[in-house]
Image (spheres, coloured by chain):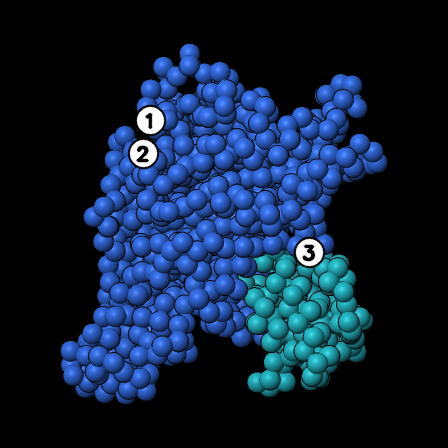
Amino acid sequence: MNNSRVSGAKIDISFVVNGEPKTVHVYPMERLLDVLRFDLGLTGAKEGCGEGECGSCSVLIDGVLVNSCLVPALQAEGSSVVTIEGLASGDTLHALQESFLQCGGAQCGICTPGMILAAFHLLNLKPDPAMNEIREGLSGNLCRCTGYSQIVEAVAEAVHRRTTA
Amino acid sequence: MKSEHIVGKSVPRKEGRDKVTGRSQYVDDMVLTDMLFGATVRSSIPRGRIKKITFGSGIAWDEFVIVSAKDIRGKNCIALIGDDQPCLASEFVNHPEEPILLLAHPDRHVLPQGVAAVSIEYDPLPAILTIEESECPSQIVWGEDNIFKTYVIEKGDVDGIWEKADFIVEGEYTTGAQEQLYIENNGMIAVFDDLRGITVWGSLQCPYYIHKALMALCDLPPEKVRVVQMETGGAFGGKEEYPSMIAGHAALLAIKSGRPVKIIYDRMEDMAATTKRHPSRTRHRTAVSKDGKILGGEIDFTIDGGAYMTLSPVVLSRGAIHAGGPYYWPSVRIRAKAVATNVPPHGAFRGFGAPQSLFAMERHMDRIAREVGLSAIEIRRRNFLQPGQTTTTEQVVREPINLGKLLDRALELSDYQSKKRRFGTENQHGATRKGMGIAAFLHGAGFTGSGERYLSSVVGVEGCADGSVRVLVSSTEFGQGTKTVLSQIAAEALGLPYESVSMAQPDTLEVPNSGPTVASRTVMVVGKLVQSAALGVRQTLISSSLLREAYTADEFRAACQRYVAAHGPFRSWSRYEAPSDIFWDDQKYRGEAYAAFAWAVYVAEVTVNLMTYSVAVDDFVALQEVGKVLHPLLARGQIIGGVAQAIGMSLYEKVVWQNGRMQNGQMTNYIMPTSSDLPPIRVFFEELGNVYGAYGAKGIGELPMDGPAPAIVNAVEDALGVPFDSIPLLPEDIMDGLASVSPFGAALAPQAASDE
């Protein structure tokens, strides 16, 4: 772990997480991923590589998909963050969560939170993507279990559910 | 009883909801009060004597807990097969990244500073880093001859066959190391107190391997070691043996500090220090008749085990038994050898030796075809094992498998013939070349030979107070669907809804030793035991007159509730018994190597770009016979995922070594396939059934790792007319291969043999 990240004095950072205002007292350059996991107990975001390659730590900041392992906590100040914990409404799963279940999009589950948020982001940008656009759109998130087919099918299924709902 | 079947249906994954909502608890998600964070100080050289350890200045060392080999109260080894691997090196190091010291600190931010401040001086010793250096041998680095294990499989009179041969075809094939690259890095938490002993929670495949290792390391009786599996984010064999090391480290720190200790590897540590797929070299020399029949042959299969024995003898065994592929060999001599080098020990990875030796076999079949003048199809068809014939270990094929028919179907599904014809014409011009490749193969399910008999697995099924049942196994879920399929089996056996069955968390305090979760054995072997243990629960209720022979789910629930109210929770146990018709000779390596084989024919279609030398897989057909498919969605997911990993092994994933250390231990420079790199992988099943498996199932998990690499490399040869015999096959290898065939253009001539 890089020392520079935890040098200096801790500061208060305020932002909205899954609709709730939060203030944390952390080092300004701490990784947002660690703040979410350790300070806020939101362990749905995972660390796979720690260098922005695997996408397991994906979250949304003001609607933009980011690798939270590369984002200093300071950058979240005043923003609105969405994590996997914020996707379902109570016991009602988001359409993407349902379709991942139905289509076998989750195997070991470690990439799943990031993958679902990446898909969520993709569908916000492109509500009716073609299969190759889904493959392209998710290519920043690595999965070692599925070979991606059932993930791609899950995203297509979520689109289908929405358009036929 | 319910008439509707649960096996064969794609029921919802048991733990699926927790996974898609992010609620699943992986080890790094778990936090204990007063927990310390642990880290490992490792060797920087491949081989040498530790001369001096210095703790640098500027660090508050009194805040750290420091553990060395001297703190080990039991035996300083990771108990597995050879018990030769130390938990912490004390005097000598035998590979880079070998653990030497352990540090723990309450602040995870301070911990890396401590690790960086420890400096270790060595008297370096000469290291050997390749199979060839180990065989030489200029240095003896393990035992008396650098050899962990050898096997010889001998069938018929090989020595007398050469003079009868019309063709003698020789080839050498090599495969590189491959990183499992589960997305969740390894991790463990340990807690110790005198009363309860040691408890570890972690990311792992085999709770009882760790249980055994901790007993030896900590000198504790079985009841004072408890191992609990947390949700595990991928494993693929990579969490079969190394977690025992990490659990040992966490345990040593917990014992010394008296506080909970968490060790989580970061990606670079995980990749540099933990196991990978064994690099291999296979040499074939085959006697073939003019009509393309294999008369006999010699196969030399050698794997690089790394610095310690770990699981190499078993990987070697599976690789050797699969080395002859799905073909009939009237005579064969297979010599197999696992050698020592000064690299981190190689270990279990999906396929376990078979992908290596089958890569060689299936590349060699194309070479034989070329030399004999037959097509890739015809050479295979003429040599396929038939029911009643024997494998290389003289196991009689009892299943009614028809490999010729399987091949025909795969050719049809892939549109092989017409594509071959089309590519033959189109490959004359342009900047790309297209090709088709086939691989036919088999994979034995369960432990090899007497393995299952020695394991003697036990499974429990419990009748619970609420009338539901709970399955007790040490078989772990790490994405394959263990919890789901074993629940289906129990539900099917009892005629209950799938929702009435739950799975106990693998916790050695509670679940029996149903063996390791490896070797494609869970559904076939453990599943069969779940089926019989479930029937025991039913029998208990019927014997106590609480239940009739024919019952509804509601009646079962009521009977179970009444029984538990009267007698307490009850458990039915089932222990593995080897079928009486399975015979295996450990000495001669002869007999029934596996209770069942899965069979497959895969077809790859590739495009090679002549400007960039890159290979794209455009289409992939995976056709297999795996017995009854108990959960179509999960089975398909297993096949696609395995093919994807094997495409990685074939075309992308290269471990770059320097002085025994992995140089590209990051996801940015060790490249696995992304969603945009992979073709649609088309999966098809044949279902013959299997008398030994639960509801006719065979193993499935490892099979898809075996076939893609040779199918793809065969397709590349088909496209370019140049043979490649090593994987991974990277663009620079293709450039070199094309350059080595002079003149350049001649290599790109259309193929000689037609497939008509």
**Foreground residue among B320 and B666:** B320
B300 displayed left or right of B558: right
Q: Residue B397 in the image: x percent, y percent?
A: 34, 41
Q: Secondary structure at mark 2?
A: loop
Judging by the rendered image, the residue that carries numbered circle 3 is: B675
Q: Which residue is mark 1?
A: B155
Q: Quadrant of residue B608?
A: top right
The correct choice, above or below, for B419 with respect to B8 in the image is above
Tags 3 and 2 both on a single chain:
yes
Q: Would you name the residue on which mark 2 appears?
A: B394
Q: Which chain is blue?
A: B
Residue B192 on image: x %, y %? 36, 62
The amino acid type found where label 3 is placed reads: Ser
Residue B597 location, x and y as percent?
39, 46
Whether residue B266 is situated above or below residue B439 in the rendered picture: below
Q: CA distance from mark 3 to mark 1?
A: 45 Å
Given the image, on which type of amino acid does mark 1 rest? Lys
Circle 2 residues within 10 Å: few <14, some 14–19, many ≥20: some
Q: Quadrant of residue B294?
A: top left
Q: Residues within 10 Å of mark 3 (few under 14, many from 20)?
A: many
Colour chain A appears in: cyan
Q: Is residue B23 left or right of residue B75?
A: right
Say whether marks 1 and 2 touch (CB < 8 Å).
yes
Residue ranking furthest to the right: B430
Residue drawn 54% across the image and 48% down it: B409
Residue at x 19%, y 79% (from the top left corner): B542
Question: Do marks 1 and 2 share a subunit?
Answer: yes
Q: Name the amino acid type tagged 2.
A: Glu
Chain bearing mark 3? B
